Image (cartoon, helix red, strand yellow):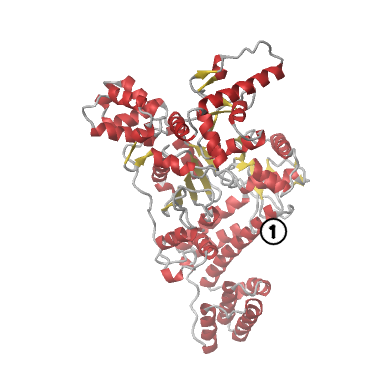
Amino acid sequence: MILQIRNGYSSLNTGRSQEGLDDNGRDIFFRILGPLQAIIHGKPIRVGRNRQLTVLAALLLHANRIVPINSLIDAVWRSAPPATADKQIQTCVWRLRNAFAAAGAPVDLIETEQGGYRIRLDEEDLDAHAFEKAVRRARELVAAGELETATAEYQRALSFYRGQPLADISGPLTYAVAAHWEERRFSVLEEWLDVGLTLGRHAELISELKPLVAEYPMRERLCAQLMTALHQSQRRAEALTVYRNSRLAQIKNLGLEPSAGLQELHQKILSGDPIAPPPAAVAHQPWPSAKVPAQLPPRTKDFTGRRDLLQRITSDLRAGGGPRVVALAGCGGTGKTALAIHAGLALQQHFPDGQLYADLRGQTDPAPPQEVLNGFLDAFGVPEQRIPPGLAARAALFRSITASKRLLIVLDDVAESTRYEALLPSGESAVLCTGRASLLKIPGLTEYRVDGLPSDEALDLLASLVGVERLFAEVDSARRIAQLCGHLPLAIRAAGARLRARPHCTLRSFTERLATRQDRIAELSIGCLDMGARLTSTLEQLSPAAYRLWLRLSLCDLDFVPEWMASAVSDRPGEDTQRLLDTLVNLHLLAVAPGEAPGGPTYSFNPLVRDHARQRAAAELGAVAGQDVVDRIALALCGRQSAAGVSGGHRSNEECTVYGTQTV
């Protein structure tokens, strides 16, 4: 298929053709609000109609966000992907990059990210982005009382629609998109009509409204607008006919009478009472008493480090192009919540319509989404009696209220089971999540792994807790404390609290206590700074097989455990073991080591987490568990050597060290 390339886009009602050129040509411009088109330097691009076009559409729908490869596979093949699906997706992306590069687009337009791809676009590079920007500008003009200019801006926004969004692509990917953008178009169209009625253009708008009401007789706002326009044009009988037809359609299709508002308008027309035009200046504000919420908790005073990660998070949240979702994932105690709050407070000026916060309690007592939405709607001043009871209805109302707002929403402790999508806003808002399990399965989400602090930042945090002079008097012991804490902020805070309570205790003696205590994690748990409780709540989510594998892996005294060794100590076949390893990585109880090893991926523990696993293994698996692990690895290693043709049974010491014992 040849994508039509033009040097710009045109507006309706400006004297230019819809397919003509605009004076403001752009280097890159994509259209999705109609058949998919690309506009790059005026050069045509050939893109395959099937897979390539679908992949491009999926990337554009989540512009500036990572689209996981699995989501692209689902978009192309739905429920029956071929065995080579991931390779075919890579080929599609490669061909798209070549096509764009040949037209002069930037070489990094489509970026490869961990687990997926991202297309980088500016706010003016996609018609959906440009549409939302024009709508925001129109609403600002309405609020300022500049209705004539606002009308032109609304028309400019609506001109981006050229039919059903992504009309040349079929499948579930586009069905939901088409429904979303159709509803979005109607809401903006109705706002524009309200402005026109406020300006007294009743006769002009009748011709616009009549075909719309004929096609959509149950859209009450359109019916009310047409009734108002007809009545103000001295066409009372026709206005009453519109009401009668709408009422019959609703009774026939829904078994319901029209809303109280439409019935009241009908009565006013019957009695000849004057009808005030819609208050266009507040048409986009559902609740006149709406508040500007500021729900973020106060920042942690001794928040330390994370500068590079903080910069990436805030940059992603500031990016334009519809709602953005960023997730921070890591095991308990890594400081995800403190980081999220710090990032949110740093962006207050960028989100002038407020900040919402909810602790979803994903690891303990998950908060129902409808309960969270109730709190959000209340924060905007929605009266209790106007909040609908069902989840879907509350989510729809929340999206309507947030459509014209720029909000930051922080969702803390999100569980995989959370009905997360119901809490997403509309418009130019952003969402920042934290969770112990990876949330990458959610399309369009950008996820960052939060691990322990680097050594210097861990020392800075400990110094802020125990005092700079006390720390640097025994800096080597301080470094050892940070290591024994696994560089986890929560554990370091607990160690700092212990040391503050013992002002005469030296750091060296405290280090010796930590190093020799069998249940080290208990020493690093005090009050709400409870590392043991955090790990326990995560471990409760594991199946017995995954938990047993985690315990046995902790007995392998290597910095990086290769995949073959994990299979050797497991009681499961290779494929089952891989699934169990994936579960442990997903919950951040294990980490995949960076880089590629010759024999497959390797896995590592956080030192404090591994010590806790060993303490549990000694108590639950018995004294012979360590020797059993050694024997299994030795047997597997012999098999690997035989398969490779290695004679003499030679093994490297590092490869065979298991829980302090060499398999020699």
Between 322 and 454, the one lying in front of the other is 454
Q: Percent position (x, y) of residue 419?
A: 54, 55
Q: Residue furthest top?
A: 648
Q: Residue furthest bottom?
A: 271
Between 574 and 237, the one lying in front of the other is 574
Residue neighbourhood size for the residue with mark 1, other residues' Cα within 10 Å, grouped as few (<14), some (14–19), many (≥20):
some
Q: Percent position (x, y) of residue 53?
A: 73, 46
Q: Percent position (x, y) of residue 415?
A: 50, 48
Quarter holding residue 125: top right
The secondary structure type at the circle numbered 1 is loop
Q: Percent position (x, y) of residue 377?
A: 44, 62
Identify the residue at horizontal 49%, vertical 86% (top origin): 273
Identify the residue at horizontal 44%, vertical 66% (top origin): 287
Quarter holding residue 212: bottom right
In the drawing, does residue 363 fall left or right of residue 442?
left
Relative height, residue 445 to residue 573 (above, below): below
Identify the residue at horizontal 28%, vertical 21% (top origin): 474
At label 1, which amino acid type do we have? Gln
The C terminus lies in which quarter of the figure?
Answer: top right
